[in-house]
Amino acid sequence: MLSDFENTKEDQITEQETLLNKYAGLHQDEGAQKPSFSHQTQQVGKLVCPKCGSLNESEADFCASCGESLHASVCPNCGAEIDPSVDFCEKCHHYIKNDICSFCGAHLSGDEAYCPECGSPRGGIVCPQCHTLNEFAFCKKCGMALTEEARAMVAELHNNHNFIALSKVASQYIQLDNSLPYESAKDKELSDQSEEFRRHVLTLLANDNGIQDPEIPINNKERKSLDEILHEKKKLMIKLASLFETMKVPPTDSAVSARNYAMACKPADLRLGWICNYKNAVHAGPCGCAKPQMGGKWIILGSKQNTKDDK
């Protein structure tokens, strides 16, 4: 049904990884060891290192391969117990890495007031649109791109055929969601009479201008019944789900680039949640996930469905 929108699976993965690596690889140490994305901590009596995935003896405190702590750490901001490999605390909603820029992923010495790579302030950026203070390159409230790199990623995605298709279907869904249904047979009859009168007037005006048998454009704002609206919304939701699948965030090395890519892919004005692969939890967005680098995707939220980040 969506063959016009989709590439092969291999093409989609290559396209997404290319874009992610473009923004993540610029700030990564090429010799650094890639972290494991598994959050499993035990395996057949062994301890699995949360950073490199190596198996260690159950009594070990640190990984024999990379030296990473094998036990939970605590958030330096609120003291909550967290995975030692995360960069964000889901308890107090604060970014906790001092050595990595939360906006672009560049390595820091820990005491800079501004990132030497992207120039973003360590204290956060206030969104000029909704005035929310943000620790990441996209506004967690309204989704606005806040850095030059974020705006460049959005501009590049606007040429992506999957994103173009996603934006088109999202626009159709929003228009349908905002439409006013008729509530009774009498309401429907009045609507039909109004449309008939409109077409009659336009025909007379065209005839006065010497145009016989004019082609009257269809009124796309014609009211539908609630059942018709729900039926069409259901079909569009299926299309959106398929398109969100093609635009999902694949596992990558950088939590920062994963967040930025996911936010750049988010269509505006839809009530969405972001389901992560880390805990299979539904967040308001990847900015609320401690390990977005494990992957995830956007989903449409139901009218009464809340996210993990809602307070």
Image (tube, grey):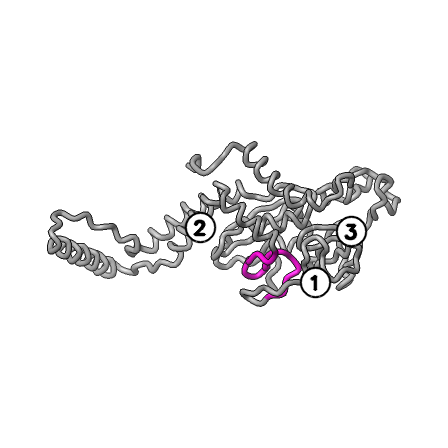
Question: x, y percentage for residue 185?
Answer: 24, 58
Name the secondary structure under disc 2. Answer: helix
The residue carrying pointer 1 sits among few (fewer than 14), some (14 to 19) or many (20 or more) residues within 10 Å by Cα, namely few
Q: Nearer the viewer, mark 3 or mark 2?
A: 2
Residue range of the region highlighted in magenta in the rendering: 132-147
Where is mark 3, residue-wise?
84
Looking at the image, residue 51 sits to the left or right of residue 277; the answer is right
Q: Nearer the viewer, residue 124 or 249?
A: 124
Residue 103 in picture, x, y percent from top left? 66, 55
Is label 1 in a helix, a strand or a loop? loop
Do the numbered discs 2 and 1 sit on residues whose CB atoms are within 8 Å?
A: no
Q: Earlier in the sequence, mark 3 or mark 2?
A: 3
- Please name the predominant secondary structure of the magenta segment in the image: loop
**What residue is at 42 percent from the left and 55 percent from the top?**
174
What kind of residue is marked 3? Pro
Q: Is residue 174 magenta?
A: no
